[in-house]
Amino acid sequence: MADPNAFPGFSCPMPLPSKDAVLLGHGSGGRLSNELLRSVILPAFENPVLGRLDDQAIVSVNGSRLAFTTDSFVVKPLFFPGGDIGSLAVHGTINDLAMGGAHPLFLSVAFILEEGLPMETLRLVVASLREASRRAGVDVVTGDTKVVEKGSGDGLFINTSGIGLVPEGLALSSDRARPGDRVLLSGTIGDHGITILAQREGLEFESAVESDTAPLHTLVAAMVDVTDGFRCFRDPTRGGLSSALNEIAAQSRVGIELEERAIPLHDEVRGACEMLGLDPLYVANEGKLVAVVDPKMAESVLEAMRRHPLGREARIVGTVTDTHPGLVTMRTLLGTTRIVDMLSGDQLPRIC
Amino acid sequence: MKYIDEYRDEKIARALVAEIAGKATRPWVLMEICGGQTHTLMRYGIDELLPAGIEMVHGPGCPVCVTPLETIDKAIEIASRENTTLVSYGDMLRVPGSRTDLFHVSAGGGDVRVAYSPMESVKVARENPGRQVVFFAVGFETTAPANAMAVWQAKREGLRNFSMLVSHVLVPPAIRLLLSSPHNRVQGFIAPGHVCTVVGYRDYENLAHDFHVPIVVGGFEPVDLLEAISMLVSQLEKGRAEVENQYVRSVSYEGNLPAQRLLEQVFDVCDRKWRGVGAIPRSGYRLRPEFAQFDADRIFGLEQITAEEPAECISAQVLQGLKKPVECPAFATRCTPESPLGAPMVSAEGACAAYYLYRRHAVTASEEY
């Protein structure tokens, strides 16, 4: 690039550094979150396990490979069609373990409660949490409660951590995608984010939109039963499909080309996105996964996914390429190509 | 999805491209005025499809981009005050003012809320009688009726804690300015369909006549834009300069008359500064004297706040279609959506941001991003 000063008269307003205070956008899961991690968090704890920046840490203990992860839940509203903060807190952590190929074993649950929260609300959330962990077959084995003064929280926040066991032979990491690999998506995108938005903004649809919140570990197990030719799994939560794929493209130093036509979308979600000017590629999911797999195995994995209740609408949505390393592109409905950039700020805060 | 899929159909789009290529005998420079149309052009890579001789330049129709620096500063001043709530469309929060932006004001304790409709701000005022609630009313003719309705409703309810920071702009005077410029390259315009849905397209007939330039009112889907381009090329090839309507499913000649009556009741036409362009006579709306009690400028005593726009910022050239965003040396290097140097990089409808988001792989030589 030429020297900017060589351009006479160029004097746009100066950029604003986001370094002096935390902004809501820092919680978006997009580029600002990334920047926060890299500038403040990672330098403090530098080690190779953390440095992989996967959804979970995989550590070896006495010959066993353990997956370990933690996640906090601040979703607003606490209850929404298809789930609530309790089920979300179970599914979110299970999914972070599952994306490492791990079989989830144990969970911890910590509550931060705001003074004045109706006891009935807490009971409902706890009941939902218990039901979600029972269905997933993962026990809550430890926990904590804290109470903060009225005004210091927003009703109820939850943190869950989880431990799981990684089967032998599976080597997953976001830096392993290779040109030619196929990108698989387990179903429709944007359902969770649009559900939350609709609740918050009082939007109504002709037919109900529900959060897709679900535990994905049995789907992952069905997939890795077919082959160990997987490079990585990701659950496209905050920041949506776009952020998940951009992270893989960046860490593997490859390009990813999506096929717009192939990406499944509920009509209601599409309509809401059209109306609100949102791109579904950036809208959060809580029960979907993307997998990058050896092209030779893609079809048989797809069949296995479609036999699982959470993968019925699974599709091959893209291909890993050697052009434009670090960049996700998409073949549009018109057959042209455009960039699918990482979300910069937040499309909508407090989605999970 | 009905009314969308047929306007994003690859076969129809390619047929239109072939039609355009078939009738264009020489190069033409066309401008889409509205930022929403720019966004569609970039998002669907329509520049990739068009025959080489058809050049699209991107007009000033992004409300976030043209809102002057001093108006952003006024909004920041309001949001920083005690007991005051500023309600705004989300995009405005990231626009840098002289010193800070609304996101940072919010992080510093200011009460800044995002709304999809100005009526939400009336509701906030109703529910918080102890707070001053201000709606940040930016935009073109499209959003003006809803904003007018909010003020009208506040007056009817006798709300004393509601006001509006008005920075509305009008399209036809801006086109007139562009066409009057000795540097003008644009030979045909796609007029903004949403704006014309409200105000009709009578005003565009004078422009077409005075400057002998064809204008087609266009929609926002890929097929809409290609059809509008095809109609413009037909006119240009035949030497015609008329106003035609491609967006018939939404736009009528007169527009939305009840909405226009409401606008006349609430707003006056006034001179207005456009960021990156300068002051344009009779190119904006302000509240009429009967609604002066809802004028945030007056209530908060902000009339004195002024800020000088950088005199020769390249955004001026981008917004007038004289330069492409990629011709700016800071594009995608020092200027990105995370740290925008100028307003067109802020909103997804801004020309620079649209290039950055969707097209920089096609226009930059850099291998790594």
Image (cartoon, rainbow, N blue to C red):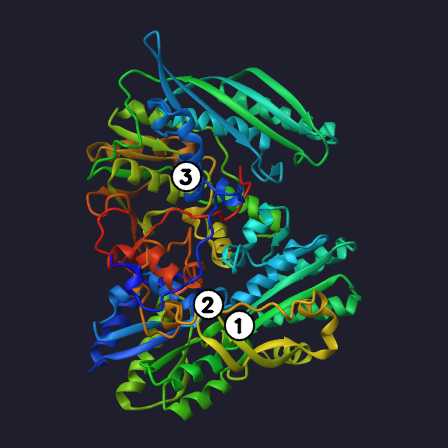
**Whether marks 1 and 3 lie on the same chain:** no
Name the residue at 33% across, 58% down. B330
Q: Are marks 3 and 2 in contact (CB under 8 Å)?
A: no
| Residue B177 spot, x, y in % from top left | 43, 83
Left or right: residue B369 versus residue B197 is: left
Task: Examine the rendered structure and indicate whether residue B110 appears above or below residue A248.
Answer: below
Q: For the view shown, which residue lies furthest in the top direction?
A: A62
**Whether marks 3 and 2 lie on the same chain:** no
Provide the chain ID for the residue under circle 3. A
**In this figure, which residue is indicated by the disc labeled 1?**
B140
Which secondary structure, mark 1? loop
| Front tag of 3 and 2 | 3
Task: Give the amino acid at mark 1.
Answer: Phe
Task: Give the amino acid at mark 3.
Answer: Asn
Examine the rendering and report whether any part of residue A70 can be seen.
yes
Which secondary structure, mark 2? loop
Task: Examine the rendered structure and indicate whether residue A286 appears above or below residue B20.
Answer: above
Task: Examine the rendered structure and indicate whether residue B148 appears above or below residue A38.
Answer: below
The tag earlier along the polypeptide, 2 or 1, is 2
Q: How many marks?
A: 3
Q: Are marks 1 and 3 in contact (CB under 8 Å)?
A: no
Measured Cα–Cα span from mark 1 to mark 3 = 35 Å
To which quarter of the image does residue B212 belong? bottom left
Crowd around label 1: few <14 · some 14–19 · many ≥20 (10 Å): many
Measured Cα–Cα span from mark 2 to mark 1 = 9 Å
| Residue B23 spot, x, y in % from top left | 23, 81
* Mark seen at residue B62: 2
**In this figure, which residue is indicated by the disc labeled 3?**
A34
Name the residue at 35% across, 27% down. A51
Examine the rendering and report whether any part of residue B19 can be seen.
no
Which secondary structure, mark 3? helix
